[in-house]
Image (cartoon, grey):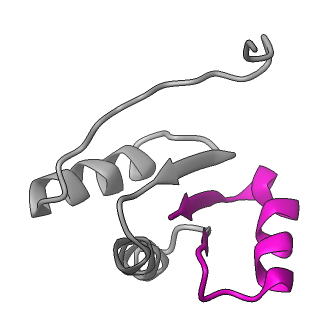
Amino acid sequence: NAATEFVEQELLFVAGSESGKLLVRGMVRTGLKPPVLVFVQSEERAQQLFEELLYDGINVDVIHADRTQQQRDNCVRNLSQKVIYEF
């Protein structure tokens, strides 16, 4: 019922607007260190942000229902090296 002392947790609510998206992208570029999990409101938004961050050259992956179980398992297995966006 409590987080391990080795995990830093931060809860940040960001608007689903262009400014919110830019804030998240800026945070990743300026020092967010993997592993990081980011939860978004919808599968579509997860896919959009995933593609935008890939375009920025950031090592990310995405988990949502349209991915195969193997893709989701690989994503979790590689979590220590990536920023993960999950719906």
Image position, residue 19 (x, y; %): 11, 54
| Left-right relation of 53 to 64 | left
In the displayed structure, 13 sits above or below 10; it is below
| Left-right relation of 34 to 54 | right
In the displayed structure, 41 sits above or below 57; it is above
Image position, residue 31 (x, y; %): 48, 39
| Left-right relation of 76 to 14 | right
Magenta stretch in the rendered image:
62-87
In the displayed structure, 9 sits above or below 57; it is above
Image position, residue 45 (x, y; %): 34, 73
Q: 10 or 60: nearer the eye?
A: 10
Q: Which image quadrant: the N terminus?
A: top right
Residue plotted at (19% across, 58% down)? 16
Residue 68 among those drawn in magenta:
yes
| Left-right relation of 12 to 37 | left
Residue plotted at (75% across, 88% down)? 68
Residue 67 among those drawn in magenta:
yes
Q: 81 or 84: nearer the eye?
A: 84
Residue plotted at (12% across, 63% down)? 18
Residue plotted at (60% across, 41% down)? 33
Number of labels in the image equals 0
In the displayed structure, 8 sits above or below 24; it is above
Asked which quadrant contains residue 42, the reply is bottom left
